[in-house]
Image: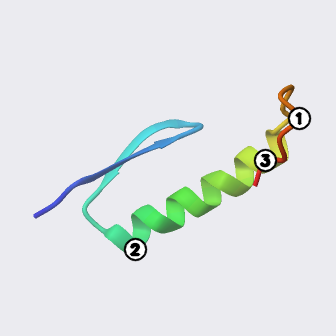
């Protein structure tokens, strides 16, 4: 059985469910995008 460790803004999260891991990552990305400030390098953040 494989355990996935995900680093989110809230810290580390471990799960054995891959689909849940992906969902958590996607939710966290949305959270990060709301908090994200424009990068000083000038590159567009995708």
Name which of mark 2 and mark 3 comes first in the sequence. 2
Please identify, in this view, whether the residue under mark 2 or under mark 1 is nearer the observer.
1
Task: Residue under label 2, please give it.
Answer: 19
The furthest residue to the top: 40
13 to 16, vertically: above or below: above
Q: Are marks 2 and 1 in contact (CB under 8 Å)?
A: no
Secondary element type, mark 1? loop
Task: Residue under label 3, please give it.
Answer: 45
Split into 4 quadrants, where in the image is the C terminus? Answer: bottom right
Name which of mark 2 and mark 1 comes first in the sequence. 2
Task: Residue under label 1, please give it.
Answer: 42
Q: Residue 21: x percent and y percent?
A: 41, 62
At 21% across and 55% down in the image, what residue appears? 3
Secondary element type, mark 2? helix
Q: Residue 42's quadrant in the figure? A: top right
Sort mark 1 into few (<14), some (14-19) or many (20+) by Cα contacts within 10 Å.
Answer: few
8 to 24, vertically: above or below: above
At 81% across and 39% down in the image, what residue appears? 36
Secondary element type, mark 3? loop
At 47% across and 66% down in the image, what residue appears? 22
Sort mark 2 into few (<14), some (14-19) or many (20+) by Cα contacts within 10 Å.
Answer: few
């Amino acid at each position: 059985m494989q355990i996935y460790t995900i680093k989110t803004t809230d810290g580390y999260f471990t799960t054995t469910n891959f689909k849940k891991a992906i969902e958590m990552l996607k939710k966290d990305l949305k959270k990060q995008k709301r908090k994200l400030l424009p990068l000083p390098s000038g590159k567009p953040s995708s």
